[in-house]
Amino acid sequence: MIRRGAKVLLDIRNLRARVAGVELLKGIDLTVRAGEVHAIMGPNGSGKSTFAKVLVGHSAYQVTSGEALFDGANLFALPAEERARRGLFLGFQYPVEIPGVANAQFLRLAYNTVQSARGREELDPIEFDDFVREKMKPLAIDPSFLGRSVNEGFSGGEKKRNEILQMALLEPQLAFLDETDSGLDIDTLRVVANGVNELLTADNAVVLVTHYQRLLNYIVPDYVHVMDSGRIVKTGDRALALELERRGYDWVGTAAAAPAS
Amino acid sequence: MSAIATNRWLESLLAAHSVAPPRPHAWVNQMRAAALERAHSLTLPTAREEDWRFTDLSPLYQLAFKPVTSASSPAGLALEPVIAPEAQRRLVFVDGQFVPALSAPAADGLVVTTLAAGLDTHGELLRAQLAQHASFQDDAFRAINTAYLADGALVIARSNAAAAAPVQLIFATTQAEVAIHPRCLIVAEQGAELTVLEDHVGLHAGPYGVNAVAEIVVGANARVRHIRRQQEGSGAFHIATCAVRVERDASYESISIALGARISRYNLNVRQAQEGVRLRLDGLALVAKRQLADTHSFIDHAVAHGASRQLHKCVVAGGGHAVFNGRILVRAGAQRTDSAQESRNLLLAPGAHVDTKPQLEIFADDVKCSHGAAVGQFEEEQLFYLRSRGLSEGAARALLTYGFAAEIVDRIPIASVVTALRRKALEQTHGEGLA
């Protein structure tokens, strides 16, 4: 929900970044305020996932210029774990498998690490078990899921639900969800989308990175941004997503010959 | 070290210890005498031999052993952490001596008793099997073990008997400068199912030597799960051979964990004697600084239609040394063999060292065999995933190290052993907040 005067959570100016010497982000501006839902759309290779990974601090990406203030702090001066502790979250497009580490163990360690950094109470295994089971219910996650190794052998839907479960536990101020909808059947998509909706408050915000309009029927965006060749080339409201679905991306590129910012 | 010097050590070792008193069973006395004679004529392995070139036993050969003094009082032993409550049948040997007070033998469909007692009750079976699988002809350590054979563990699962609970065999050493020669014979008759937990534990940090031999026979259509934990003291030398014979349509699954000892060497020799056999050999060595852990496995697909799967992992701290040699022989007649071997290794710090060598020898043409060896650090994506959840880089590395080890530990079908080893893995990887 757009509210005048809502707190600015993220303010990005002229962000440029490269990986292995290739510039993939070529000047991005974006402001996200508390309570807002943003969607970033665009064709494959337009830089959407890169943008998300740069923001959460993946070491393979090098920021070459620009700045980002997250909750007032210089984001790019913080290591990845510090960004997470301060409330930045990435829901991975391809959640990583960690054999040998039980999901419950991983979730509790992440939860307690973040809680401790925020000066809040940590939970012992028994307390955490009750706590996490409550968080699993809205996502319709089977309890057996806690004993399995992190993401190992999980179906696509289970992996994405596990990402949203982590979001529910870590209570980020700002969550980037990178193609959380891809590969989900409609029932799972609905469960995942409802899970995200339940986490949204007036104090936090979410940025959905997606190819498809479909997700936006369930999580209604306030802003829709179109990325192309490492830039945001067009910004609109929900109607833009519908138009993109009807007309594809080609027309946006031509309309945006002039820089969008 | 020269062959003459090692042989002098061997002579002094053999001279210093009288062999066990004669048995009323002439064949045992003959076997021991033959082994003793063989021990005198064999040379001890040195790093000049291909099979031992990464594992230098010179420090062992400098050790002077003294006889075992009378065993400590069983009540005072810190064996609690080793005892698996799931095991209803258990044999405990302390400094080579059987300790009835800590043991729970059995004598029905499942026989769990000492070799000494078994000579009277199961003499024919012992005569047919003992020293038939772990030959003492070509190995000085096995010859010494056989020459000193006085007692040991005997487990027999009778035909079609399924033992739901694991059998635990504990060999503990409590004294420095002693040489102990543990011995096991495990027989699963046709159609039987058996889980054996073999524990070697050191309750002394000083130098001592353990020279163990186990023989396992898995009869037709039988299934044996064999879990082995080596947790010798930090000054110990642990040399062991396990020889396994697997018969028609039977299955043998081994999980061996090496944690302790200054230098350890485990030879696991598995022979597929008949068709239709399934083998699974998993191993984990957690190697701390100043430790060397060597695993030599040998899978002999002697006949057709055998399947083997092997995953061996080593986690090596700075200054530690792990060795893995995985030999797989597919003999000329062993068509349709399906074999996959993987060696995965993690070096935690500069100065950590691993030597890993797959050794495939294939003489049949219709087989499927694969092998792979990886020595690595962590995957960048795994580290990033954990850091993006708030974990520091150090905590992320510790968790990944722990997970690397726990993947093997989790395959153990005994809950209390999994819990205990997970804790060990945590201590070794300095993980925090994971209890």
Image: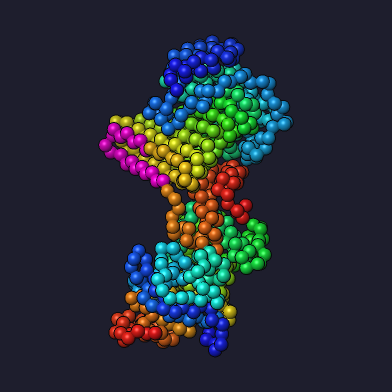
Vertical position of residue A184 compared to residue B348: above or below: below
Q: Quadrant of the C terminus of chain A?
A: bottom left
Furthest residue in direction bottom, as rendered: A4
Between A187 and B211, the one nearer to me in the picture: B211
In percent of width and height, residue B66 lies at 61, 19
Q: Nearer the viewer, residue A9 or B341?
A: A9
> Where is B58 relative to B147, above or below?
below
Does residue B268 show up?
A: no
Depth order, front residue of B284/B388: B388
Residue at image coords 66%, 30%: B103
Q: Give the left or right position of residue B171, taking residue B354 as reference.
A: right
Please tell me which residue is depicted at 43% across the width and 25% down the height of the picture.
B46
**Magenta part, dominant SS:** strand
Where does the magenta region start and end? B358-375
Q: Point out the residue furthest to the left here.
A: B365
Say above or below: A143 vs A164: above
- In the figure, residue A225 lies in which quadrant? bottom left
Count of numbered circles in the view: 0
Left or right, A127 with respect to A169, comes to right
Q: Residue at x 73, y 31 (%)?
A: B75
Residue located at (58% from left, 59% from top): A109
In the displayed structure image, the side of residue B412 where residue B175 appears, left or right: right
Residue B345 is situated, as x and y percent measured from the top left of the image, at 44, 44
Instruction: Out of B10 and B295, give the one closest to the viewer.
Output: B10
Q: Is residue B360 magenta?
A: yes
Instruction: Look at the image and name its color scheme.
Output: rainbow
Q: Is residue A7 magenta?
A: no
Whether residue A18 is visible to the viewer of this picture, yes or no, is yes
Residue B265 image offset from top left, x and y in percent: 48, 31
Displayed quadrant of residue B172: top right
Where is residue B281? Give x, y as percent.
Answer: 45, 38
